[in-house]
Amino acid sequence: MTDTTDPATTAASATRAGRGHWDHTPGAVSGLTATGGLATVELTWHSYRPRRGQLVDHYEVYVSERADRGGDLAHSATLLGRTLYPHLTHRVGPEPRKRHYTVVAVVSSGARTRPARPVSAVSARSVAAGRAVARVGDFDHKGLEFALSPDQSARYRTAFPSGVDYRYGASTPGRDWSYLHPGPSDAWGGRKEHTFTLRFDLAAAPKDDLACALWLIDAHATAAGAAEVTLNDRPVRTLQFQGGATRGSVEGDATRVGSALKPSYYEFPLAAGLFTAGENVLRLRKTSGSWIAYDALGVFAAA
């Protein structure tokens, strides 16, 4: 779930809609907590227990960029999403920002509780918030801008017979970077290793270390495998990928309400001594397991 909220639906308007039923839904959700992380804010709360004869139909989670009226979100929060469970992951962008949250329980009659006591969290700063030296895609929990997305992996070997070779500033994601990176376990990829290459030019070698950000919208659930990262043919990192939901081969938007996609995020330094003036080459070679599905990849300098 990301910052795509419906500004027409606020916590105030939602509770006003159910105000006639408040005598049947006393109290409010309790135990709401918000924990900021890289590209996410994790929200959890205690399960609401309605009066006998009623059941919780769902929870509505609201978010605001500001806490007005002494922390009361009733007039500023917008609907972030609905969930059947007492937790929700808010997927956010690279920049650290403070956000404020509340939750309303909706029971089977349609009545709503009062908004929960608001909580706040700040997401962690991603290296992708820095100055882009080279990048492919947008860090937005979507992979729809890439070639073959969202479900044309069967065409991969025809479209990319030698793997992906992308030049920053000249290539385009929709033509030159596949949304899915096959691994040696994938029959549709020929059951072999595949290398994705990102080329970029520097007027001079950097004096300070840079950093790499690799965001995925999904991966194979049980065989996400690993990849070797090299820069100018020198080893940088072995990435062991987290298992996903095995849905990224057929859908490309982790912000969609109800999406089963399980994004993951990998960020690590790139030593200044690895770079050179002129062309630089970053490669990801999938050495084991099955596919990963891209959100974005980039090399960044501190802002």
Image (cartoon, rainbow, N blue to C red):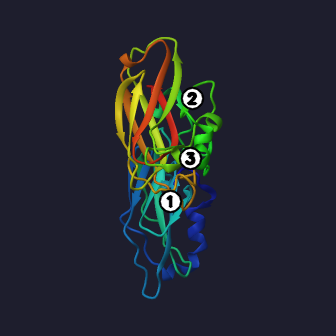
Give the spatial CA distance, label 2 vs label 1.
29 Å
Q: Which residue is mark 2?
A: 166
Residue shown at 44% from the left, 65% from the top: 116
Please tell me which residue lies in front, 39 or 280: 280
Q: In front here: 51 or 143?
A: 143
Q: Is residue 56 visible?
A: yes
The vertical placement of 120 against 135, above or below, is below
Using the numbered discs, state the Cα–Cα distance from disc 3 to disc 1 in whole angstroms.
Answer: 13 Å
The first of marks 2 and 1 along the sequence is 2
Instruction: Name the disc covering residue 142, or none.
Output: 3
Q: What's the amino acid at mark 3? A: Lys
Q: Quadrant of residue 51?
A: bottom left
How many marks the image carries: the answer is 3
How packed mark 1 is, by other alpha carbons closer than 10 Å (few <14, some 14-19, many 20 or more), is some
Q: Residues within 10 Å of mark 2 (few under 14, many from 20)?
A: many
Q: Upstream in the sequence, badge 3 or badge 1?
A: 3
Mark nearer the N terminus (2 vs 3)? 3
Instruction: Give the amino acid at mark 2.
Output: Tyr
> On screen, 166 above or below 65?
above
Q: What residue type is disc 1 on?
A: Ala
Quadrant in the picture for residue 85: bottom left
In x, y percent, where is residue 106? 51, 74
Apparent side of residue 185 relative to residue 252 in the rendered image (left or right): left
Q: Name the front one of labels 2 and 1.
A: 2
Q: Quick check: 6 left or right of 223?
A: right
As helix, strand or loop, the secondary structure at mark 3 comes to: loop
Q: Position of residue 32 (x, y in %)?
A: 38, 62
Q: Which residue is the site of mark 1?
A: 260
Marks 2/3: CA–CA distance: 19 Å
Name the residue: 40% across, 31% down: 229
SS state under label 2:
strand
Nearer the observer, 273 or 48:
273
